[in-house]
Image (spheres, rainbow, N blue to C red):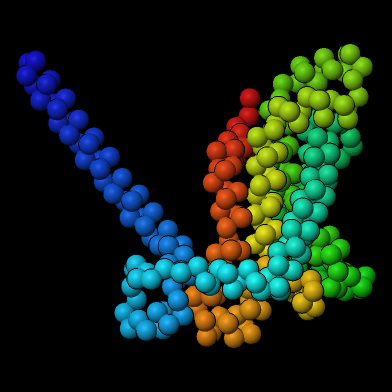
Amino acid sequence: MQNDYDLLARKDRRNERIRKALIYLFLAVWALMVLFPFYWMVLSSIKSYSEYNAETVPNLIAKNPTFENYINVMKEGALSRYFLNTLIFTVATTLLMMAVIIPAAFAFARLDFPGKNLVFTLFLALMMIPNELVIITNFQTITNLGMRNTYMGLILPSVTSVFYIYLLKENFEAVPDELYKAAKVDGTSDWKYLWKVMLPICRPTIVTIIILKVIECWNSYVWPRLITDDEAYYLVSNGIQKIRESGMGKMNIPGMMAAVVVVSLPLIVIFLIFRKKIMEGVSRGGTKG
């Protein structure tokens, strides 16, 4: 009888090892598929123009790696201006959005006012509206206000987010009501309670929202492309497209890849540094109690 139990146990362990091996194999193949475009981008950027054009069959390793393409990109004055525009747009948009969504989420989570549930339901209903319709409305509004080719025209349509309000509201509601009641007994104002209690407790979610918004702003393409036709207000996404259309992207592929690497590097660094906080904040957003 004992031998049968041992045999079954060994069979179960063997099946478990096979299952884990298959899972790891699948994840490894999937990781290669996802990471290969990034590898190819970096690989192409360190090849010289002559080496790249001389290849009849693409090589997976650069024979004579060079950083000349990066030097040429950094000397490009237009790219520096695109970086500055994107930095201004990203910082201003993120700060204004946080100033809007934090009080809004707190109001929906802790304050009682007539029609709160109805208003919040209407807020959630806005998430069902296609972005294309919102872009059309925003374009008409910004154009009528004479804000095309301005920083305000770029920033204003992005200073709020229904999804981030919902995410932050769920986190605020997870904070025990006893803390709020105790604070009110002590005479603490709602504003002071928000800044002294709620925000420190929900810091992981706050950090996650900031990081996700920064990534969203940095990658923004459609709206800046639509609302700006003055190169002085181009963001990096539009600037890269401008560089490509000017001929560099068609003639000098390694140089174009170097420019894309330079533009992508800040987001990659941010994600690698804060990836744990992002996962923690998202997981907290879906957990109450």
* 231 relative position to 72: left or right: right
Residue 185 image-quadrant placement: top right
Q: Pick the residue in front: 101 or 152.
A: 152
> Percent x, y for residue 122?
78, 50
* 244 relative position to 37: left or right: right
Q: Pick the residue in front: 171 or 21.
A: 21
> Percent x, y for residue 138?
81, 67
Residue 224 seen anywhere in this rendered image of the structure: no
Which residue appears at 19% of the width and 30% of the height? 12
Which residue appears at 74% of the width and 58% of the height? 87
Residue 281 image-quadrant placement: top right
Q: Is residue 14 above or below residue 39?
A: above
Residue 6 seen anywhere in this rendered image of the structure: yes
For the C terminus, give its image quadrant: top right
* 134 relative position to 270: left or right: right
For the N terminus, give its image quadrant: top left
> Percent x, y for residue 249?
56, 80
Q: Is residue 3 above or below residue 154?
A: above
* 12 relative position to 52: left or right: left
Q: Pick the residue in front: 34 or 60.
A: 60
Residue 153 image-quadrant placement: bottom right
Which residue appears at 68% of the width and 70% of the height? 79
> Percent x, y for residue 44?
44, 71
Q: Pick the residue in front: 162 or 147.
A: 147
